[in-house]
Image: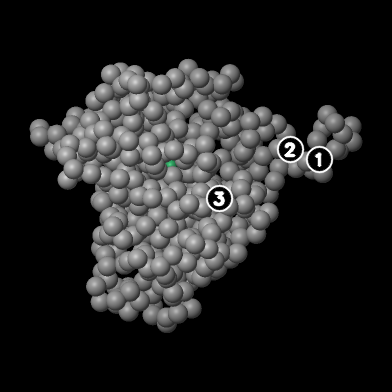
Amino acid sequence: MTAGSANSPGPSSNPVRAAATAEEVFGARQGLFSRAYTGDDDPLNEARLKELFGPQAAMEGPLAPTGIGCRFHGVDVAQRLRAEQAAYLIDALSMHSIVVFAGQDLGRVSLAHFERFANHFGAPQPVPKRVTDGVRDAVNEALAQIAGSEDERLEHLPIPAESSAIYTVTNVEPVTAGSVRVLTPRPRRKSATRRQDISDKVRCEVLWHTDQDHERIACNTTMFLVHKHPAARDSASGNWLGSYPEVDYDTFYRHPDLPEGMEHFHTTDARLVRLRQRNLPLNAETAFADTVAAFEALPGAERDRLEKIRMVKYERPGDDVEGRGYYCPLIRTNPRSGRRMIYSPVYGSRFVLQDIPPPRIEGMSKAETKVFLDELEAHCLQPRFRYNHLHAEGDLVIWDDYALLHCLPPVKIGITHLDDARLYYRIATKGEPVLTLPRRDNREWLLENLNDTYTSPAEILEVGSG
Ligand SMILES: [Fe+2]
């Protein structure tokens, strides 16, 4: 049989797509952007921060035991960034994996300011209108239902008219005619849930992931602007949730709506199950696992082996046939920081419920691929690499998706007090960070990697400093 015939696809017949290059994922810049603006050996030191942002600016960190995380004070995200300021902040994210800009005054910092700021880190991912339509009104309706008095009033910030980038993360859901309008999409049965069925319950979905990790170019950052974080604490435990929540592990891992042929998803290594559920946040923190530290902790021979693994991933249902999919390295190196990271070692992606096939490692069967990735995920989820990040109102927090795994915290739903409310605005980005705006992403790249040609409009990029 000749190579390339119908029964024997050869190298010329519809080959697996090449892996996205480091340049496609992180941008072309080698070394820190800040090197172009200062000769300082440590271009991210506090003196330089003050020089760039003023004497009030300060830094605090590391936030996590592995040494990642940096909280900045006195940096106003409503200000337009000069190129050298943007360089500093982009570099800080590359080096620290999680950066927080604390103390933003949300009476002054608008969602347009947030979106302009986000544009420096990557192209904002558009959120489909069907997901965002009516959400602000619905949140405000729910907030009015649970507000105890006029002084407690809280309202969803206005969304800029032409923006498609803002996604609302909240546990505040309005009750209409006895049923809850579920605002945040989740892979549960679609029928409306009766309020009394979920009152005082906890929603908990134990899925460690990287945002859009089934796509050839995943999100490089995810960010929250924190408007309201739960303030209530249980008097006995001192925690928001009180005792440790019962994990609804079946929500995904033995979900009744799992498509046929996804049996692999049902049986998961017991150690991994334990680690996924261990030390989940009790105060609505975002849970992180530091995959840079997890990589560095491996023996040299194992690191070499991981760098040589050839993994094929899939973006669409039915793609797991010969010649489809794309290569995806397990180890990525950020060209600005030089830090190496284990990238999203998760066999069963969240997108399994949309029939996205799990990855395949060349030279391994499906079962072997699963065992291998489950072990690697378990390695990353060990307590020594974990960090639960506590959010505070007025924080703008950005994390580097490639350098971390993250997991949603358990949250109370069916809440009846504003003290239990959680209201964040989220933007995720992809592609090259830029020092100056507007971005110049071309239409074809946007269509291919963001499924849309959305770019932040001039009214957002030119919004005043507030
Ligand atoms: Fe996520």
Name the residue located 29 percent from the left edge and 30 percent from the top edge: 413
For disc 2, the neighbor class at 10 Å (few under 14, some 14 to 19, many from 20) is some
Query: In terms of image quarters, where does ligand 1 lie?
Result: top left
Which quadrant does the N terminus fall into?
top right
Q: Which residue is tagged 2? A: 323
Q: Which residue is tagged 3? A: 307
Disc 3 within 8 angstroms of ligand 1 (CB): no
In this image, 108 relative to 316: left or right? left
In this image, 98 relative to 211: left or right? left
**Spatial separation of the CA atoms under disc 2 and disc 3:** 22 Å
Q: Secondary structure at mark 1?
A: loop
For disc 1, the neighbor class at 10 Å (few under 14, some 14 to 19, many from 20) is some
CB atoms of marks 1 and 2 within 8 Å: yes
Q: Secondary structure at mark 3?
A: helix
Which residue is farthest front?
150
x, y percent for residue 398: 39, 55
x, y percent for residue 249: 38, 25
CB atoms of marks 3 and 1 within 8 Å: no
Name the residue located 28 percent from the left edge and 57 percent from the top edge: 107
Name the residue located 82 percent from the left edge and 32 percent from the top edge: 8
Name the residue located 27 percent from the left edge and 71 percent from the top edge: 57
Q: Identity of the amino acid at label 3?
A: Glu
Which residue is farthest left?
236
Q: Identity of the amino acid at label 2?
A: Gly
Residue 416, by quadrant, is top left
**Spatial separation of the CA atoms under disc 1 and disc 2:** 7 Å
In this image, 230 relative to 185: left or right? left
x, y percent for residue 125: 52, 49
Q: Secondary structure at mark 2?
A: loop
Q: Identity of the amino acid at label 1?
A: Ser
